Image (cartoon, rainbow, N blue to C red):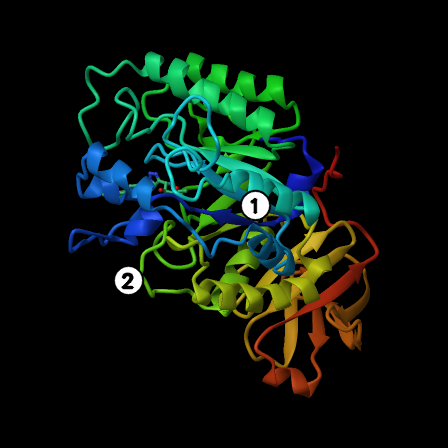
Amino acid sequence: MKDTKQKWFKEAKFGLFIHWGLYALLAGEYKGVKTNQIAEWIMNYLDIPVEEYEKLAGQFDPVNFDAEAIVKLAKDCGMRYIVFTSKHHEGFAMYHSACSPYNVVDATPCKRDILKELQLACEKYDMKLGLYYSQAQDWHDPDGYMAKKDNSGKNYRAYLDRKCMPQLRELLTNYGEIALIWFDTPMGTTPEESMEMAKLVKELQPNCIVSGRIGNGLGEYMTTGDNFIPRLPFEGDWEVPATLNDTWGFNKDDHNWKSAEEIIQLLVKINSRGGNYLLNIGPDGTGNVPEESVQILKKVGAYVRANEEAIFATKRMPVYPYDLTWGDLTCKEHHLYAHVFRKIPRVEILNINNQVKRAYLVETGEELAWKVGKSCEGDGYIVVELPKEYLKKEYFCIGIELEEEMPNFEPIKE
Ligand code: H79
């Protein structure tokens, strides 16, 4: 079972992923050819030569990038942490790196240390900042791995010594407190090499969490596959990285946005099973966050903020065969929360044998009528009656206070 030993991560439940790099300038299209794949993979997918791709740096001048506005957006959405791509597979550092001139200060006309801007904004708004770092794939360094291509003849060790390790050291030394390092696609990284990276992180910042994709079974929490939600409650610390449309990096032609309702339902489903939801935005080449993303997040945020007690610091549900048609359940020690997404006159929950103290509407605190009983099969159940006007509401959350603790709970420890 994975354990980050970090209370903030266990309680966070909702975070913002930011994918931003040179690929944002291409926005899913290179020389008239569009990619129908995730847009940050365009260099790989369309076989853009390094000498061509690196010219993008000369055009990087994101006049619309506003770190504070993004951090505020996350905060208003009830998100508790941000993970920013300090270097994606393309190999371009979005911070001022002394070990590679291929970075956002030295190689661009804007000369802005984007990570520093984000760090300061996060500090101002008391937001945890984590960093995505593509440790194995580096399509710019001749010795970095490149998925789907021939990697024979590469000296991975030379790349690790020249770029990966020194850059990790910079990131963990020059940008304040880093909440976590989000590794990705370990490829040919050996167990010893993964260990070496994890050790470096912990040496420099003992509280910095090492994410699941460092490889070789290491890492302090489980990262699911991209956009993948485990079928059942899952023990330990884990997180689902997910997109709002079908790309991480900005793609001007991807309009397949999920609705706010879908996102809220996914958040609650993930929380119900014990995980954190790391939801992505991909700013465009000017630094602007797509308006659709902003609108969705604001609507999601309204629900999350109004129902904070039913989301933050909740725990995975005990593994009962829940198959709810109307929504999902989250819980804490003495509380069960029913997130209702269908228009129903009453909420019935089976398999709850705890003594109920009261039921209420989380948003307003309004008390609701309830009764408990036993089914023919002998399972306890509770029925909460909903006021008629709630048949008109798109979604809302009911709190049920219990005499006894929900089963199988460990207190969250520091
Ligand atoms: O950062 C995001 C992705 O870029 C990264 N992980 C998330 C968080 C990621 N790395 N690898 N993958 C995802 C797997 C990607 C495989 C594919 Fe493809 C890339 C499938 C489609 C595009 C390579 C290019 C295989 C087919 C085309």
Displayed quadrant of residue 251: bottom left
Q: Residue at x 67, y 87 (%)?
A: 388
Give the image location of residue 197, x and y in percent.
49, 19
Residue linked to disc 1: 82
Identified by mark 1, the residue type is: Ile
Can the viewer see residue 126 in this picture? no
Disc 2 is placed on an element classified as loop
**Frontmost residue, 159 versus 288:** 288
Ligand 1 visible in quadrant: top left
* Quarter in which the C terminus is drawn: top right
Mark 2 C-beta to ligand 1 under 8 Å: no
Query: Considering only order in the chain, which callout, 2 or 1, is on the residue closer to the N terminus?
Result: 1
Q: What whole-number distance in Å separates the C-alpha atoms at marks 1 and 2?
A: 25 Å
Q: Determine contact: label 1, label 2, CB under 8 Å.
A: no
* Quarter in which the N terminus is drawn: top right
Give the image location of residue 210, x and y in percent.
54, 28
Q: How crowded is mark 2: few (under 14 residues within 10 Å), some or many (20 or more)?
A: few
Can the viewer see residue 179 in this picture? yes
Give the image location of residue 244, x and y in percent.
43, 58
Q: Residues within 10 Å of mark 1 (few under 14, many from 20)?
A: many
Q: Disc count in the image? A: 2
Identified by mark 2, the residue type is: Asp
**Frontmost residue, 218 versus 403:** 218
Residue linked to disc 2: 253
| Residue 123: mark in rendering | none
**Frontmost residue, 32 versus 60:** 60
Q: Relative to 380, is 234 on the left or the right?
A: left
Disc 1 is placed on an element classified as strand
Give the image location of residue 281, x and y in percent.
46, 54
Q: Residue at x 35, y 32 (%)?
A: 91
